[in-house]
Amino acid sequence: MLILYTKLEVKRHDIFLDSGMIDPTRDSKGCLKVNFETFETSEKNLFVVDACNIDPDQVMIAAGQGASAAMEIHQRTLIDHGI
């Protein structure tokens, strides 16, 4: 099955970060760069999925990315609490 992704333009969904003086690394189009294993940005403990990162924008992809990020956050919480 071949799936085609079309990106017409990049619309930032993370402008609220600007007022918090948080400046994660972005690509040349302004999309947030993430570690695609954890979905963490260059800012420690700032995770982003789907429309805020450089991956294709689709609901099913966002759901999977959200689950992956949640597992990473849960694991870190357990480690922080010595569990």
Image (cartoon, rainbow, N blue to C red):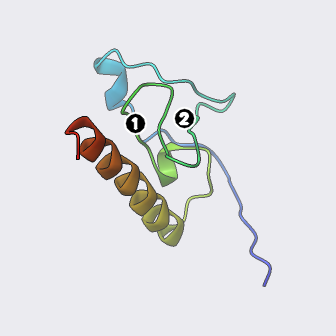
Is residue 8 rendered to the left or right of residue 47?
right
Quick check: 45 left or right of 27? left
**Callout in the foreground (2, 1):** 2
* Residue wearing tag 1: 14
Residue 66, labelled with which disc? none
Q: How many marks?
A: 2
Q: Residues within 10 Å of mark 2 (few under 14, many from 20)?
A: many
Quarter location, residue 67: bottom left
Residue type, numbered disc 1: Asp
Which of the labelled discs sits on residue 32, or is there none? 2
**Which residue occupies 48% across, 66% down?**
64
Q: Residue at x 45, y 58 (%)?
A: 68
Q: Is residue 58 above or below residue 17?
A: below
Helix, strand or loop at disc 2? loop
Quadrant that contains the N terminus: bottom right
Relative to 46, 2 lies left or right:
right
Q: Earlier in the sequence, mark 2 or mark 1?
A: 1
Looking at the picture, which amino acid does disc 2 mark? Leu
